[in-house]
Amino acid sequence: MKIVILGCGRVGAALATMMDRAGHDVSVIDYSSDSFQRLSPDFSGETYVGNGVDEEVLIRAGIKEADAFAAVTNGDNRNIMASQIAREIFKVKKVVCRIYDPLREEIYQELGLETICPTKVGARLIFEAIERK
Amino acid sequence: MYIIIGGGGDVGYYLTKGLLNHGHEVLLLEKNATRFSALNEELGQAVVRGDACEARTMEEVGASRADVVIAVTGEDEDNLVICQVAKKRFKVGRTIARVNNPKHAEIFQKLGIDITVSPTKSILSLIEAELPTFRFIQLMTLKNAGLEIVELRVPAESPVAGKALREIHLPRSGNLVLIIRNKQNITPTADTQILPNDDVFALVNREGEEELRRVFGTIE
C-alpha cells in the first residue's frame, strides 16, 4: 500500500515507522525538516517538507497514487482541511483524520470523515484504569 | 441581519465597523486576549472573546439564529472549519470565507462554502488592471455558470485591430458583450469594427478565454 502521512510529530513518526516496517510505501510530510529526526534510523520511506494543505505538496508526496492518507499534525483544522482535500479532490479511499477537540470530531464524523479523537480515547482509557483499581 | 465574524485582525475589525454602520447586528469573535482588549475598547459589546472554530463558543453567541457567518482569520484551515461548522451544525444560510491562498478558493467551494473572497487575488487583479499589459483582466467570476467576465484593451499590434467582427473568428464559447471606445458604449454587432485602444468586455468560459486570447493576439 502507498500511504501519505501528514505531520511528523510523535504520532506521525511512530505511525510512519510502523507502516514502513510493515512493508508499505510511506511518504511523510511536515513543515519542519527537523521533525524527520523522530523517524527511526532505518526508515526507508520518503520525507517531504511543506504545507499539508497545499495541493502541490500533497501531489509531490504522491497523494494521487495513495491508497491511504492520515492527517496527524498538531492542528485540528489543518488535519480536517487536508483530509477533505485528500478525500474530495484526490479521491483517496482511506482517509483518517485526528481531531483533538471532541465536539469538532463529532461534527466531522457526522460529515462522513473517519476521525480519531485521542482526547476521548485517552480519557476513557485512564478512566477505566482507575475504575479497575 | 445578524452577522457573526470570526477573526479580529484588520479585516475583521473594519468589516465589523462597516457592517455596524450599515445597521446590522454584528458580533466579532477574537480568541487572543491582548487583541480582544484592543478591539473591545473600540467596539464594545460587538466583540466577544472566543474561538470561532469552537462549536461551543458559536452556540453561546447564538450561531443558529445568524443569517451570515464570515470567517476572516489569517489561516485558511480555520476559515474553512468556521464556515463548515456554521453550516452543518448551526444551519447558517450563508457562509463567507476569506482565502489567503488563492488556490484554496476552488477547494472551499467544493467543500460547501457559499462565498470565498481572496484578497491576494483581488489585489493582484486590481494591480494588473493598472498595468499596461496585453492581457485579459478577469473582472468577475460567475461560479455557478462556470463563466468569467474579462476585459481587454486592444493593443495597436493586435491582429484584429481594424477588422470588423464578421471577419474575426470568435470562439463560440466567448461572447463579446460590450466595447467602450472614447467613453462611448458600443453594443457589438457583426459590422462593428475593432479599433486599437478599444476596451473589450467578454463573457467567456475557461476554454473561451484562451481562444479569445489567441484571436486577439495577446501575450501572457
Image (cartoon, coloured by chain):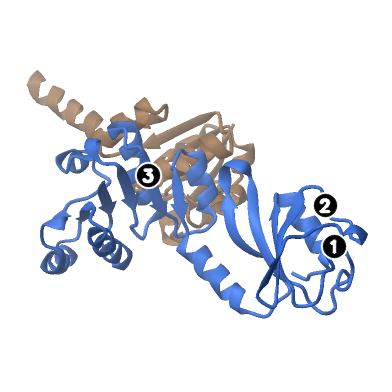
Q: Upstream in the sequence, badge 2 or badge 1? A: 2
Residue A98 location (% of width, % of height): 36, 37
CA separation, marks 2 and 3? 36 Å
Instruction: Decide if residue B70 is in sight here.
Output: yes
Palette colour of chain A: brown
What's the residue type where badge 3 is placed? Thr
Which mark identifies residue B97?
none
In the displayed structure, B155 sits above or below B20; it is below
Q: Which residue is mark 3?
A: B95
Q: Residues within 10 Å of mark 3 (few under 14, many from 20)?
A: many
At mark 1, the secondary structure is: helix
At mark 2, the secondary structure is: loop
Nearest the camera: B98 or A13?
B98
Which mark identifies residue B215?
1
Q: Upstream in the sequence, badge 2 or badge 3? A: 3
Circles 2 and 1 on the same subunit: yes
Contact (CB < 8 A) between labels 1 and 3? Answer: no
Q: Upstream in the sequence, badge 1 or badge 3? A: 3
Q: Which residue is mark 2?
A: B171
CA separation, marks 2 and 1? 8 Å
Q: Residues within 10 Å of mark 1 (few under 14, many from 20)?
A: some
What's the residue type where badge 1 is placed? Val
What's the residue type where badge 2 is placed? Pro
Q: Comparing marks 1 and 3, which lies closer to the viewer?
A: 1
Q: Comparing marks 2 and 3, which lies closer to the viewer?
A: 2
